[in-house]
Amino acid sequence: MTPTAHNKNADTKKTYRAGTSTHNPPTHSHCARRQSARLLAPVLAVCACLWAGAATARPAVVELFTSQGCSSCPPADALLNTIADREDVIALSYNVTYWDYLGWRDTLGREEHTARQEAYAEYFQDRKYTPQLVIDGETHMPGSRTRASRAAIEDKVRKVQPTADLATETTTDGVRISAPAREIPSSRSHATVWLVQYDRRKQVEITRGENAGENITYANVVREITPLDNWDMSKPLTLDVARDMLLKGAHDGCAIIIQASGDGSSPVYGVGRVIAATRIDMAALN
C-alpha cells in the first residue's frame, strides 16, 4: 500500500492535542483573605505543572507476535486483552504465518507481520518465536510467561518519560503529524514513522491444529502497517496523511509509532527503540 503522505520538511507551528479539562484552583468563600490566596498560588502552580507532565507522557508500545496455530499463544493473547484498552499502553497483535503448515491457516496472519518479526530477530540478534512480546522496541520475552510479561510492561510504563515531541491535528483532509527537530548524533539521526491500523477486537473459532476447539478473542489486531517516512530527526517533521488512507478498510484503531532506525545510509525495515507514539482519534475523522 502506497502511503498518501507528504513530508513538507519545513518549520511549522506545532499543534498539541491538550486535554479538554483544565486545572482550576479551589473556590474560596467571599470571606477568604487575599493573603491566603497569595500563599496558595505557588502550591497550585506546582500541582498544575505535575498535571500537565502526566498528561503528556506517551504510551508504552507493546507488540505481541502470535499465531492461531500455536498452543502456547492463548495465555499471551488473553494478557493482551487485559491491557488493550489502557491509555498508557498501545498494545498490538501481529498474527504471523509460519505455523500455518501445522493444520490451521491463521485467519488473521499476514506475511508483513512475519517480516516485521524477522526484522526484530535480526535487531535483537535472536530467533523468532511465538508468542513473542516486544516491549517499546527495546526488549523481548515469551508472552506465555504472563506474570513476568505483565511486570515488564508495568516497569516500562513507569519509566516512559513525559514528552511533547509528537503532535497530531485533525484537518479537513485528514491528519497532520508534526514533531520538532532533535539534537542527536548523526549516527542515530534517522527514525521510521509508522502508521499502524488495527481492529480492536476479532473473535476466531479454531477448528483444526494445536488450538482446535478454542474460541479466541484477539485484541488490537494489526491489519495494515505502513512506513510513512524515514525521518531525519535533525529537521522538523510534518506529515499530512489523507483521510481516505486512514479510513480505508474501516479499521477502528490507528496509531503512529516512531522507531529509531540508525543513520539512514541504507534501506532499513525500521524496527528499534520506540522514541514516540500516539493514537489517532478515528471518531474525529468520521
Image (cartoon, helix red, strand yellow):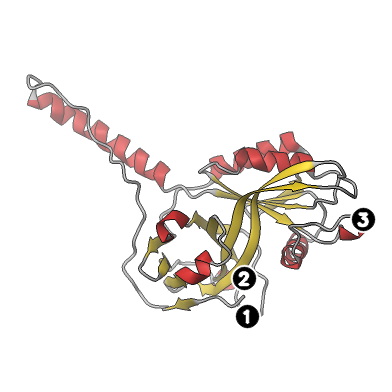
Query: Is 10 left or right of 161, judged from the image as shown?
Result: left
Kind of residue indicated by mark 2:
Gly
SS class of the residue under badge 2?
A: loop
Kindly identify which residue carries mark 3: 102
Kindly identify which residue carries mark 2: 262
Percent position of residue 53, x then y: 39, 44
Query: Is 80 left or right of 254, judged from the image as shown?
Result: right
Q: Which one is in front, 224 or 251?
A: 251
Q: CA distance from mark 1 to mark 2?
A: 8 Å
Query: Is 85 left or right of 143, judged from the image as shown?
Result: left
Name the quadrant of the N terminus: bottom right
Marks 1 and 2 close (CB-CB < 8 Å): yes
Query: Is 37 left or right of 198, judged from the image as shown?
Result: left
Percent position of residue 55, x then y: 40, 44
Q: Which one is in front, 65 or 187?
A: 65
Furthest residue toward top: 31
Percent position of residue 283, x then y: 44, 54
Residue 82 seen in render? yes
Residue displayed at 55% across by 72% down: 228
SS class of the residue under badge 1?
A: loop
Dot 2 alpha-carbon crowd within 10 angstroms: few under 14, some 14 to 19, many 20 or more? some
Dot 1 alpha-carbon crowd within 10 angstroms: few under 14, some 14 to 19, many 20 or more? few
Percent position of residue 245, x then y: 52, 70
Kind of residue indicated by mark 1:
Ser
Dot 3 alpha-carbon crowd within 10 angstroms: few under 14, some 14 to 19, many 20 or more? few
Residue displayed at 41% across by 48% down: 56
